[in-house]
Image: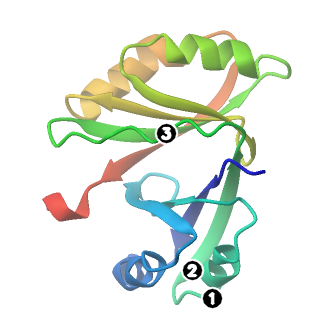
Amino acid sequence: MSAGAYVLVKFEDREKLLPAVATLGNLPEVSKWDAVDGHFDLVLRLKDGRSSAIEQIKKLEGYSDMATCELQSDEKEPEFSPDHSYSYLFIDTERYQQKAVQSSLAKIENVASVWPATGACDLVAVVKGENFDHIARIINKEIRPLDGILRLKQDRIIFLDRM
């Protein structure tokens, strides 16, 4: 049984993002979505990694690219406080060090959640901070130096309802 998946979606035209969210937000397979700024434009949490929603995403107007991170544990999503900023981290680890990196990340105070994954990355983490500059300092001082991390991509969560 799948613990779900994160699907990262890129649009060639960001003007198509809001209509896409209106469509995708109504799909029963989508448990959560976040607009992001970084390597992708939208991060969807699917209840099942093999969802039919993936084919519907590919049909969206303005769709450009997609990556999937199938989750290997069913840890709950963190609650997002309006007092903090948040970023997703999609992390590639050295072979056989995924569990050690996950354990190290879980010990960092500002890491709200971390899940093992397969597909586009080895770990998915959510980092919180006072603002995006604070998150960048946490990433550079506490996360990037961890043994076993090869690469990480940061996508800042943009709360459209706060704009």
Of residue 26 and residue 141, the one placed in the foreground of this image is 26
**Which amino acid does the dot numbered 3 rest on?**
Lys
Which is more N-terminal, label 3 or label 2?
Answer: 2
Q: Nearer the viewer, mark 3 or mark 1?
A: 3
**125 to 12, vertically: above or below:** above
State the SS at label 2: strand
Is 108 situated left or right of 163 in this image? right
Quadrant where the C terminus lies? Answer: bottom left
Q: Quadrant of residue 134?
A: top left
**58 to 155, vertically: above or below:** below
Residue 15 in percent (x, y) is at 35, 82
CA gap, disc 1 and disc 2? 7 Å
**123 to 39, vertically: above or below:** above
The residue located at (61%, 13%) in the rendering is 103
Which is more N-terminal, label 1 or label 3?
Answer: 1
State the SS at label 3: loop
**Which amino acid does the dot numbered 1 rest on?**
Lys
Residue 126 in percent (x, y) is at 45, 35
Q: Which residue is mark 3?
A: 76
The residue located at (52%, 90%) in the rendering is 61
**Which amino acid does the dot numbered 2 rest on?**
Tyr
Q: Quadrant of residue 36?
A: bottom left
Residue 59, numbered label = 1
CA gap, disc 2 and disc 3? 28 Å
Q: Which residue is mark 2?
A: 63
